[in-house]
Amino acid sequence: MAEFSTAAPLALPKAEIMGHPRGIFVLFMAEMWERFSYYGMRALLIFYLTQHFAFPDVASTQYYGAYTSLVFAFSILGGFLADRAIGQWRSLRLGGLLILSGHVLLAVEGAMGAPNDLTRQIFFAALGLIIAGTGFFKPCASTMVGALYASGDHRRQTGFFIFYVGVNLGAALAALSVGYLGQAFGWSYGFGAAAVGMALGLLFLQLGQGDLAPFAMNAPSGNKSAGLTLLLALACTTLGWVLVQNPAIVGIALVAVVAGAFFVLGRYILREADATERRHLFAVIILFLGVSVYWSTFEQAGSSLNLFADRVVRMELLGMTFLSSQSQFFNPAFILLVTPVLALLWATLARLNREPSVGFKFSLGLGISSFAFFLLSVSIGFAGSEQRVGLEWLIGYFLFQTIAELCISPIGLSIMTQISPKKLSGLVMGLWLMGSSAGNYLGAQIATLTARADNSDLVVDTAAEAARYGQVFGYVAIYAAMAAIIFLGLSPTIRRLVAQR
């Protein structure tokens, strides 16, 4: 049975900066650069599919959705393997190396000229490496944030906000630099910049090993087999490579993975869990469903909203012109601005014993997401003669979507690490990230509703295209509003389930 190292409590008194464990700042830097690599590549991916490979919109959004959903789906597999086979610290470093290899391979493929069968397979192999690497890296990084704080430590939620700032600082830097390099100078420059980011993340992990490794869950019986680690990396990469180029079967695979995770949780509930753990695991399942719905709206950002920015939005503001991929900058930038304000608000309400419950925060986030899409739907009515809407509408969308995200993502992440049984910590974190996977897959199906006709010989009707985006965004607004109402009704139940006693 995997256990947390007993060295952690001895390290705490000597390992604090600004009132927090030093490890949180190591994870801040490592995650910042890992997310720099991920979001930088993500900002370019839909354009790479539609412009470099010339895939039709529907195929491009399906490949995009398959990739982004598998990135998070493999987190449940990676979390499970970290718990049961190789340990969290080994998994973290392995994941970073696989991600780095994937971005290097993308940069090589981008420099190989016109696409052909060989370069397409190189491209999908690169995606397979990133999928597998993120699966090993992401759940362990998030779980280790929680492991740095003792149960009941009031600093835990602030620690997750610090971690979340690192995530979004990396994403903001990536949107401005990786997207710009890829669209302005060539795909290889963008993908190469993403590779440099991941290399920096690995460097910070290595430098901060002493502040993190003692808190990591060990492999069973201290397993340190390099052969097993290599075999698991190869198997996961191959599986990712096969699945990402077959979007039609990804949905089936996701259902199977979620069913498998629920089976493990159900068996634990029936055989081992005490009353408190049972309540907590039921809360995990409900919050998983809520976050899946939320990410299906939010994750329009890299697919339909990126193409919306490219085709419908006038990318100019205050005399500055932006590239379409740089629209991805606004969400992480707003997170950096809004996070301290919202963290202060929650902390103040907590001191007054008036902080909203987790369920209410989920309902609030879904409602605000609904309003954000309502804004985009309305914006079409203000399109100019060229059927282009002002960039300020898209910025307004990202502002409200950011507030929605901060009501759901860091709050839910903190709760997952707080209520998950130690024996299943990696699996529960993988399931939480699986909510992003399910949301990405569902979001890709929504994005196909905005797609242009596959016949490239047709003249694009810009007015009809703008109207189609407005209609689909209106449907998304209604869908998110319905989910908000449901979670508002479930809020008292969720409050009882997540209670510590």
Image (cartoon, grey):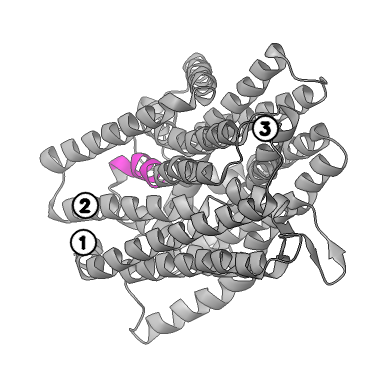
Q: Quadrant of the N terminus?
A: top left
Q: Is residue 60 visible?
A: yes
Mark linked to residue 28: none
Q: Nearer the viewer, residue 132 or 449?
A: 449
Q: Circle 2 is placed at which residue position?
A: 282
Amino acid, disc 3: Leu
Answer few, some or many: residues within 10 Å of disc 1's Cα (few below 14, many 20 plus, some between 14 and 19): many
The Cα–Cα distance between marks 2 and 3, rounded to whole angstroms, is 40 Å
Mark linked to residue 49: 3
- Say which residue appears at 68% left-offset and 26% top-offset: 101
Amino acid, disc 2: Phe
Please give the range of residues in magenta: 423-432
The Cα–Cα distance between marks 1 and 2, rounded to whole angstroms, is 7 Å
Q: Using residue 40 as the reference point, say whether residue 399 is left or right of it.
A: left
Q: Circle 1 is placed at which residue position?
A: 497
For label 3, the SS is helix
Magenta stretch: dominant SS? helix
Amino acid, disc 1: Leu
- Residue 106 at x, y percent in the picture: 72, 27
Q: In the image, is residue 431 part of the stretch drawn in magenta?
A: yes
The answer to whether the residues at label 1 and label 2 have Cβ atoms under 8 Å apart is yes
Label 1 vs label 3, nearer the camera = 3
Sequence-earlier tag: 1 or 3: 3
Q: Nearer the viewer, residue 223 or 241?
A: 241
For label 2, the SS is helix
- Residue 348 at x, y percent in the picture: 45, 84
- Say which residue appears at 76% left-offset and 46% top-offset: 179
- Residue 195 at x, y percent in the picture: 73, 35
- Say which residue appears at 88% left-offset and 39% top-offset: 185
Sequence-earlier tag: 1 or 2: 2
Q: Quadrant of the C terminus?
A: bottom left
